[in-house]
Image (spheres, rainbow, N blue to C red):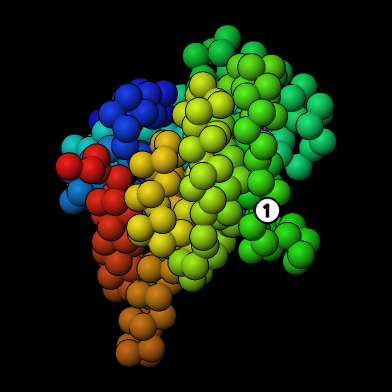
Amino acid sequence: PLVSTAELVSTAAAEHRGVAAFNVITLEHAEAIAAGAEQAGTPAILQISENAVRFHGGGLSAIAAAAAAVARASSAPLALHLDHVVSTGLLYAAADAGFGSAMYDAAKLPYEENVRATADAVRWGHERGIWIEAELGRVGGKEGETPLDAHAPGVRTDPAEAAAYAAATGVDALAVAVGSAHAMTERTAALDHALIARLRDAVPVPLVLHGSSGVPDDEIRAAVAAGMVKINVGTALNSAFTGAVRSFLANGPGVVDPRKYLAPARDAMAATVAGFLGLLRPAV
Ligand code: G3H
Ligand code: ZN
């Protein structure tokens, strides 16, 4: 069923476990995430980024409607989230497209401007019952950033500033920079677990880890134990998907029907999803 991000994140936080949010680019992504969540027997968040919306010609409704339909048909609880929104026009379209939550990304702005823009986004969201995540610090590695930024560990989030930011903006969750970077294809990131614990103690809202594809399994488990709640994963799904397509086509040069290679690619992605979800169960 389609559930809300607010509900999944607050339940996960109360139970001291993580909830994973996976990036959806195509219909097959949504189907693979639903299949992986069903295999793992856990909820998950389907998130569509502004970059993915741009890939679909700028229109929000088709891919959002497809992901929502996949969520409604699934036996796993799945939420729909709009990720890394920079344009307020797109944010304002989220309410009508069925999103119960959005990440408003003003992390590139200087602190005061980030606070002002995010507070406006939160006010807008809360008037409509939309849960808003924001970012403080710089996770880095997003497409279009300068090569210097790519895969750099980013500018770490300061706990005192994060507490002030959460109070000044009223955000529902906070993405923080603690050593991960976006778009890593190797799982070699080392997180600052002491910083995560300090942020958890200083910030009253759930913390979000971006760029989790590059974070090794035990580092993700430790991050959740230290207080991370929403764990965002994108690139690892694309690596699994594209790797399966590549090997299928290498062995079948005569293949024409896309279903022949999309099916194993979707299966590989579902297995990756289930693997990440398995890390987030509460420690026994
Ligand atoms: O918001 C999306 C995530 O931060 C995904 O990052 O593609 O590096 O896993 P990733
Ligand atoms: Zn991100």
What residue is shown at x 64% (from left), y 63% (from top)?
A: 151
Query: Is 126 situated left or right of 259 in this image?
Result: right
Question: In percent of the image, x 51 and y 44: which residue is there?
Answer: 194
Q: Is residue 247 above or below residue 89?
A: below
Q: Position of residue 81 (x, y in %)?
A: 47, 34
Give the farthest residue toward the top.
127
Does residue 53 show up? no
Within 10 Å of the Cα at label 1, are there few (<14), some (14-19), or many (20+) other Cα atoms? many
Q: Is mark 1 within 8 Å of ligand 2?
A: no
Residue 183, image quadrant: bottom right
In terms of depth relative to the viewer, which is nearer, 84 or 182?
182
Placement of the N terminus among the 4 image quadrants: top left
Decide if residue 5 is on the left or right side of residue 31.
right
x then y, percent, for residue 82:
53, 36
Residue drawn at x 79%, y 32% is 111
| Residue closer to the observer: 110 or 254 | 110
Say above or below: 253 vs 230: below
- Label 1, secondary structure: give it: loop
Disc 1 marks which amino acid? Gly
Q: Compared to 209, does 174 lie above or below?
A: above
Q: 136 left or right of 41?
A: right
Q: Position of residue 231 (x, y in %)?
A: 43, 44
Q: Locate the C terminus by quadrant.
A: top left
Residue 119 appears anywhere in the view: yes
> What residue sits 81% from the left and 27% below the top?
112
Residue 68 location, quadrant: top left
Q: Which residue is mark 1?
A: 154
Q: Is residue 202 above or below residue 125?
A: below
The image shows residue 78 at horizontal and vertical percentages of 32, 35
